[in-house]
Amino acid sequence: MRQLLLLRHAKSAWDDPALSDHARPLNARGRRAAAAMSSAMRGLGMRPELVLVSSSRRTLQTLEGLGTLDGPPRIEPMDDLYLAPWERLLQAVREVPDNVRSVLLIAHNPGLHDLALNLASPEAGPAGVEARSSVQALAESYPTASLAEFALEGPWASLGVGKAQLLRFLQPGDLPEMAA
């Protein structure tokens, strides 16, 4: 079983109109959300072996906000993941070597949300109220610093529409650290 983690970058700052979109940094709330998501990931035993990350400042700062990940994972910043459509994000994951069991992809909406919606197999979802709640929450929106965890069988190259099982969808608002 392989694990795919899809993390949307944390909340970015808009206070400097001279900055390009690519250069926008995280704001204070975004830094706090990245740290909270890091704590949640550690608590759930998530240990990605490979991180594919957009080259934008806010995605790289989100990765930095996660702190030192166990492993540590190999990190691949990729220019073409910046504001990429879901098909390009899927292609990047399909190119992952088969010896990698867990991948963290840090990218942007709408591509990341579209990827998550396309991957989720409606019939292969986990059972129970919590699972249905995750699927419903994912369908509604993909807020900044949210994380979707998918399980899939087979090689990365076989990943496609409806070929993954959504295990959980965590939003910063779900985390105790962000309740205040």
Image (tube, rainbow, N blue to C red):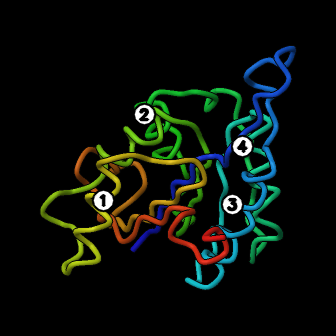
Gap in Å between the C-alphas at discs 3 and 1?
26 Å
What's under tag 2, amino acid-wise? Trp
Mark 2 or mark 4, earlier in chain: 4
Secondary structure beneath label 1:
loop
Q: Residue at x 75, y 55 (%)?
A: 63
The residue that disc 2 covers is 86
Callout 4 touching callout 3 (CB < 8 Å): no
Gap in Å between the C-alphas at discs 2 and 4?
16 Å
Secondary structure beneath label 4:
helix
Q: Nearer the viewer, residue 78 or 140?
A: 140
Looking at the image, residue 147 lies above or below residue 116: below
What's under tag 1, amino acid-wise? Ala
The residue that disc 4 covers is 59
Looking at the image, residue 150 lies above or below residue 117: below
Mark 3 or mark 1, earlier in chain: 3
**Can you tell which of label 4 and label 3 is closer to the viewer?**
3
Residue furthest out toward the left? 123
Q: Around disc 3, counting alpha carbons within 10 Å, would you say few (fewer than 14), some (14 to 19), or many (20 or more)?
A: many
The residue that disc 3 covers is 33
**Can you tell which of label 2 and label 4 is closer to the viewer?**
4
Image quadrant in which the N terminus is located: bottom left
**Can you tell which of label 2 and label 3 is closer to the viewer?**
3
| Label placed on residue 164 | 1
**Can you tell which of label 4 and label 1 is closer to the viewer?**
4
What's under tag 4, amino acid-wise? Thr
